[in-house]
Amino acid sequence: MPKSAKDRIERRQSAIHGNGVFATAAIAKGEYIVRYKGRLRSHAEVDADYGELEGSGHTFLFTLNDEYVIDANFDGNIARWINHSCSPNCEAILYEDEQGRRDRDKIRIHALRDIAPGEELSFNYGIVLQERHTPALKKLWACHCGAPHCTGTLLQPKRRRKSHVVMSVD
């Protein structure tokens, strides 16, 4: 398992949204920072628990694969506080289990570029919804990252091929 930079990050108030995760020391490009942790649940379980709730556009759910979701509302760690940005300094990488056991796949956060002490960590959540991206949905999933090329929404353009990882975090 790669050594993480989790001892060089902390949670605090963010200008992007609510809580955020910030570097307390330099983090090098490509470095493994932290694993996204939470309770492993089926899509059906998550839909049953959260499907009918009025959404705020912010959750601690991370789609792991076609079978499972990581629900960081339970047993979540600091990674759940990493905010979205249209110009991210990190990326979420899916590590598939070598024996094909889908319940053992993992999401790890890595630095896309060098990150300076005090800088907020962010990645593109890559949220792809099946339904039409209406103005109401875009408002629900509004982006406040402040990046020069901010799209104004966490929703990603629909692609012909299936999206691999979908994420939303508060």
Image: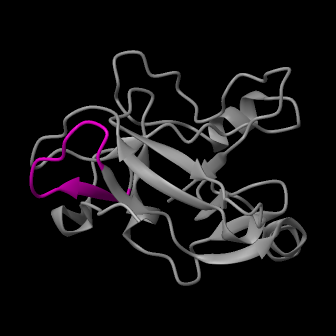
- Relative to residue 61, is residue 81 drawn left or right? left
Give the vertical position of 12 relative to 133 (above or below). below
Q: Tell me if residue 30 is in the magenta stretch.
A: yes
Name the quadrant of the N terminus: bottom left
Seen at 30% across and 47% down, the residue is: 121
Give the vertical position of 87 relative to 139 (above or below). above
Between residue 54 and residue 164, name the one nearer to us.
164
Seen at 64% across and 36% down, the residue is: 139
Range covered by the magenta-colored residues: 18-31
- Relative to residue 107, is residue 30 drawn left or right? left
Q: Tell me if residue 165 is in the magenta stretch.
A: no
Give the vertical position of 21 relative to 77 (above or below). above
Question: How many circles with numbers are drawn on the protein?
Answer: 0
Q: Residue 79's spot in the image, x, y percent?
A: 41, 63
Q: Looking at the image, what colour scheme do you see?
A: one colour
- Relative to residue 57, is residue 25 drawn left or right? left
Between residue 35 and residue 77, name the one nearer to us.
35
Between residue 165 and residue 54, name the one nearer to us.
165
- Quarter of the image holding residue 66? bottom right
- Quarter of the image holding residue 163? top right
- Quarter of the image holding residue 133? top right
Q: Residue 47's spot in the image, x, y percent?
A: 86, 67
Q: Residue 71's spot in the image, x, y percent?
A: 64, 72
In the displayed image of the protein, which residue is found farthest to the top? Answer: 149
In the displayed image of the protein, which residue is found farthest to the front? Answer: 99
Q: Residue 136's spot in the image, x, y percent?
A: 74, 36
**Magenta: predominant secondary structure element?**
loop
Give the vertical position of 149 relative to 45 (above or below). above
Seen at 38% across and 26% down, the residue is: 87
In the displayed image of the protein, which residue is found farthest to the bottom? Answer: 75
